[in-house]
Image (spheres, grey):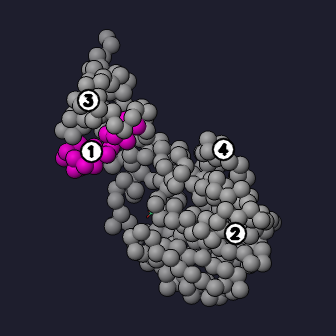
Amino acid sequence: MVNKIPYMTLLEARDLYRETLQTKFSNGEIDFYFKSLMTESFQREPTQLALEPESELEPLEVLFIQEAATKLLKDYPLQYITGTVHFRTLKLKVDPRVLIPRPETEELVDWIVEDFGKRTDDTKDILDMGTGSGCIAIALAKENTQFTVSALDQEQPILDLAQENALNNGVQIHFFQQDLLQLDSLKQSFDILVSNPPYVMRKEQEQMQPNVLDHEPHQALFVPDEDPLVFYRAILKFASLHLNSEGIIYFEINPLLIDELRSLIQQFDYTISERMDIFGKVRMLRLKKK
Ligand code: GLN
């Protein structure tokens, strides 16, 4: 027997969405989810609901949004359902292999872009350390042809996704598999190092939302409470040997660790600048070689 999938108008589907999800989300959130599914998953115009509320959804679309509602009720992130995230001017594919790029990370890229503008006088070799979806590396390569961008991550399936994103956005990045804690084997030197490494302490877990905690990759998020700066230390050690003169490091950081970071960095030879994110927290550091 073939299950009959109901035909539904856009407005009926939206109302059903509000009804199904109202135990957990506000109407504003539900409408946002609904619109995102329509535009990201079905390539419908965002204005269609307002302009053509009676237009019909395909049975497959009805099925998809029903399944999506079940997932949203279980805190599955919307971006993993649509498989899409917008990062600055880029459209990137995301799935549970990688962290969903955050607005704070866009701000880190903004900082680098501001510092280098659209200059094309000399090339800069950049390494993105722990690239995940490739968001930082791809945004930088897209922004400035002066940048020659490499990016590493620890597992091939992650790099495959990042590579797909680079191709879809028309840029060339040299992706390679490398453990951030075993950088000794890496021989090349760079002008700019950038990293948003894992920095969330286990003890912060209680305050985290279930959409992050239950569904995003822990290896991209968490560090041990007893050594939360482990990745920063590894990168700084690497930089002592592999950052060119006048080189710069850009870090996304955990605002809770700013004091510890300052003392760690003092053991090396850098001028530090700090920057706050849109939420007013010290979220970014720039280290210039003295
Ligand atoms: N900013 C991310 C979050 O708040 C964490 C990213 C990271 O650990 N590098 O979930």
Real-space CA distance between mark 2 and mark 3, rounded to the nearest whole angstrom: 50 Å
Mark 2 against mark 3, which lies toward the viewer? 3
**Hey, what amino acid is under mark 3?**
Pro
Split into 4 quadrants, where in the image is the C terminus?
bottom right
| Residue 91 percent across, percent down from the top left | 53, 46
Mark 3 against mark 1, which lies toward the viewer? 3
| Residue 1 percent across, percent down from the top left | 31, 11
Q: Which residue is mark 2?
A: 192
Upstream in sequence: badge 4 or badge 2: 4
Q: Which residue is mark 3?
A: 53
Q: Which residue is mark 4?
A: 170
- Residue contact between numbered discs 3 and 4, judged by CB atoms under 8 Å: no
| Helix, strand or loop under label 3 | loop
Task: Please tell me whether residue 163 is drawn above or below residue 126 in the rendered image.
Answer: above
Where is residue 187, by image quadrant?
bottom right
- Residue contact between numbered discs 3 and 1, judged by CB atoms under 8 Å: no
Can residue 92 be seen in this snapshot?
yes
Mark 1 against mark 4, which lies toward the viewer? 4
For residue 189, side relative to residue 229 (left or right): right
Stretch in magenta: 21-39
Query: Which residue corresponds to the image point at 77% horizontal and 65% vertical from the top-left?
Result: 121
**Hey, what amino acid is under mark 4?**
Gly
Real-space CA distance between mark 2 and mark 1, rounded to the nearest whole angstrom: 41 Å
Upstream in sequence: badge 2 or badge 1: 1
Q: Which residue is mark 1?
A: 30
Upstream in sequence: badge 2 or badge 3: 3
Where is residue 44, by image quadrant?
top left
| Helix, strand or loop under label 4 | loop
Where is residue 246, by image quadrant?
bottom right
Upstream in sequence: badge 3 or badge 4: 3
Real-space CA distance between mark 1 and mark 4, rounded to the nearest whole angstrom: 33 Å
3 or 271: nearer the viewer? 271
